[in-house]
Amino acid sequence: MEKFDTKAAADYIGKSASWLNKTRMTGTGPVYLKIGGNVRYERTDLDAFLQGSRRTAVYAHANDNARAQRAAA
Protein backbone atom coordinates (compact mmCIF):
# COMPACT_ATOMS: atom_id res chain seq x y z
CA MET A 1 0.00 0.00 0.00
CA GLU A 2 1.54 3.30 -1.12
CA LYS A 3 1.62 5.95 1.60
CA PHE A 4 2.19 9.71 1.33
CA ASP A 5 3.30 12.27 3.89
CA THR A 6 1.19 15.42 4.19
CA LYS A 7 3.09 17.42 1.55
CA ALA A 8 3.02 14.60 -1.01
CA ALA A 9 -0.67 13.91 -0.31
CA ALA A 10 -1.51 17.59 -0.74
CA ASP A 11 0.33 17.67 -4.07
CA TYR A 12 -1.49 14.52 -5.18
CA ILE A 13 -4.96 15.98 -4.56
CA GLY A 14 -4.08 19.53 -5.64
CA LYS A 15 -4.39 21.17 -2.23
CA SER A 16 -1.93 22.72 0.20
CA ALA A 17 -0.40 20.94 3.17
CA SER A 18 -2.00 23.64 5.35
CA TRP A 19 -5.42 22.72 3.97
CA LEU A 20 -4.85 19.05 4.84
CA ASN A 21 -3.71 20.00 8.35
CA LYS A 22 -6.90 22.02 8.86
CA THR A 23 -9.15 19.26 7.55
CA ARG A 24 -7.62 16.79 10.00
CA MET A 25 -8.80 19.12 12.78
CA THR A 26 -12.35 19.41 11.39
CA GLY A 27 -12.69 15.85 10.07
CA THR A 28 -13.63 17.06 6.59
CA GLY A 29 -10.59 15.83 4.66
CA PRO A 30 -9.38 12.46 3.49
CA VAL A 31 -8.92 9.51 5.83
CA TYR A 32 -5.38 9.35 7.24
CA LEU A 33 -3.17 7.15 9.35
CA LYS A 34 -1.39 8.21 12.52
CA ILE A 35 1.75 6.12 12.89
CA GLY A 36 3.57 7.19 16.03
CA GLY A 37 3.91 10.93 15.58
CA ASN A 38 3.65 10.75 11.79
CA VAL A 39 0.63 11.34 9.58
CA ARG A 40 0.38 9.26 6.42
CA TYR A 41 -2.23 9.05 3.67
CA GLU A 42 -2.83 5.94 1.59
CA ARG A 43 -3.31 6.48 -2.14
CA THR A 44 -6.60 4.55 -2.06
CA ASP A 45 -7.98 6.90 0.63
CA LEU A 46 -6.93 9.97 -1.37
CA ASP A 47 -8.57 8.54 -4.50
CA ALA A 48 -11.75 7.77 -2.53
CA PHE A 49 -11.78 11.34 -1.18
CA LEU A 50 -11.46 12.74 -4.70
CA GLN A 51 -14.22 10.46 -6.01
CA GLY A 52 -16.48 11.55 -3.15
CA SER A 53 -15.96 15.18 -4.16
CA ARG A 54 -17.47 14.74 -7.61
CA ARG A 55 -20.47 16.99 -8.18
CA THR A 56 -22.98 17.76 -10.88
CA ALA A 57 -24.10 21.16 -9.56
CA VAL A 58 -22.88 24.00 -7.37
CA TYR A 59 -25.72 23.71 -4.85
CA ALA A 60 -26.05 20.58 -2.72
CA HIS A 61 -29.81 20.30 -3.25
CA ALA A 62 -29.29 20.16 -7.03
CA ASN A 63 -26.52 17.55 -7.05
CA ASP A 64 -27.18 14.27 -8.78
CA ASN A 65 -24.70 12.18 -6.81
CA ALA A 66 -25.86 8.95 -8.44
CA ARG A 67 -25.01 10.39 -11.86
CA ALA A 68 -21.63 11.59 -10.60
CA GLN A 69 -20.88 8.12 -9.20
CA ARG A 70 -21.87 6.47 -12.49
CA ALA A 71 -19.57 8.84 -14.39
CA ALA A 72 -16.70 7.92 -12.06
CA ALA A 73 -17.13 4.18 -12.68
Image (cartoon, rainbow, N blue to C red):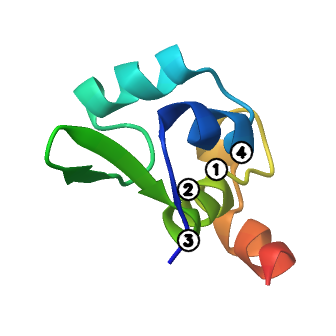
- Amino acid type at circle 4 is Tyr
Instruction: Check disc 4 and report the residue beneath it.
Output: 12
Percent position (x, y) of residue 47? 64, 63
Instruction: Check disc 1 and report the residue beneath it.
Output: 53
Percent position (x, y) of residue 40? 39, 50
The reply to whether dot 2 and dot 1 touch (C-beta < 8 Å) is: yes
Q: CA distance from mark 3 to mark 4?
A: 12 Å
Question: Is residue 38 placed above or below 32 in the rendered structure?
Answer: above
Name the secondary structure under disc 2. Answer: helix
| Closer to the eye: label 4 or 1 | 4
Instruction: Check disc 3 and report the residue beneath it.
Output: 44
Q: Which of disc 1 and disc 4 is earlier in sequence?
A: 4
Name the secondary structure under disc 1. Answer: loop
Instruction: Check disc 2 and report the residue beneath it.
Output: 49
Name the secondary structure under disc 3. Answer: helix
Q: CA distance from mark 2 to mark 1?
A: 6 Å
- Amino acid type at circle 2 is Phe
> Residue 24 occupies which quadrant of the picture?
top left
